[in-house]
Image (cartoon, rainbow, N blue to C red):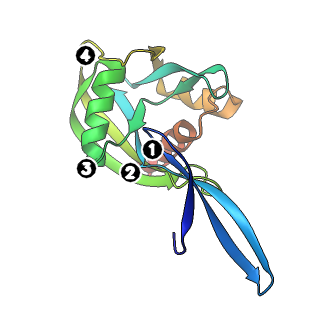
Amino acid sequence: MNQQATLLLETSRFRVLEQEIPVDKDTVVRRPYIVHPGAVAIIPLLPNGQVCLIHNHRIAVDKTLIELPAGTIDPGELPQTTAQRELREETGYAASRWRSLPGCFMSPGILNERIHLFVAEGLEPGPPGREPGENIENWVVDWKHTLALVESGEIEDAKTVVGLLLWDRLKKA
């Protein structure tokens, strides 16, 4: 944010700002955008060649999506700390080994949210600690089937598509 922006909306998770952009000496355009603290997505790998995905109902699209476990970074929290917390909360698993992958911006035309991607291995099961209102179910899937779900379009969530395809490429390299 290089110039002064106007706050349009503030919520517990993000802010909506609008900035005036000079086009020429007589023209200014207004561009709204969302400021988000960032998030994490985790690829939880089980030792038998499976991955733990989740079914997560998303009200913005009124649909249950197949996703990687994920969550918003709390103020002052490191992304890996968020990843450890969210993996346990959403799936019940705790991991003994973590690997950071390159992250990505989700929709930089309107949103500054950066997703930090992690691979979690050495999983130990436990009870999930889902937040009230979270409609999430674990789904353990064979890796090849997971890739087929991406290729068929059944996995529509961008962070999940990016994370799975990136990890598949990196582990083959």
Does residue 93 appear anywhere in the picture? yes
Q: What element carries label 3?
A: loop
**Residue labelled with disc 4:** 125
Q: Which residue lies furthest to the bottom in this view?
A: 25
The mark nearer the N terminus, 1 or 2, is: 2
User: Would you place residue 24 above or below residue 81 in this image?
Assistant: below
Asked whether the residues under the numbered discs 2 and 4 touch, taking CB atoms below 8 Å apart as contact, a structural biologist would say no
Report the residue at 45% width, 15% height from top. Answer: 133
Residue 32 at x, y percent in the picture: 65, 56
Crowd tier of the residue under label 3, counting other residues whose Cα lies within 10 Å: few below 14, some 14–19, many 20 or above: few
CA–CA distance in space, label 2 to label 4:
23 Å
Q: From the image, state whether disc 3 or disc 2 is nearer to you.
A: 3
Left or right: 107, with 54 as reference point: right
**Residue labelled with disc 1:** 167
Does residue 47 appear anywhere in the picture? no
Toward which corner of the image does residue 154 lie, by quadrant? top right
Left or right: 120, with 18 as reference point: left
The mark nearer the N terminus, 3 or 2, is: 3
CA–CA distance in space, label 4 to label 3:
28 Å
**Residue labelled with disc 3:** 76
Amino acid at circle 1: Trp
The mark nearer the N terminus, 1 or 4, is: 4
The mark nearer the N terminus, 4 or 3, is: 3
Give the camera-side residue of 143 and 95: 95
Q: From the image, state whether disc 1 or disc 4 is nearer to you.
A: 4
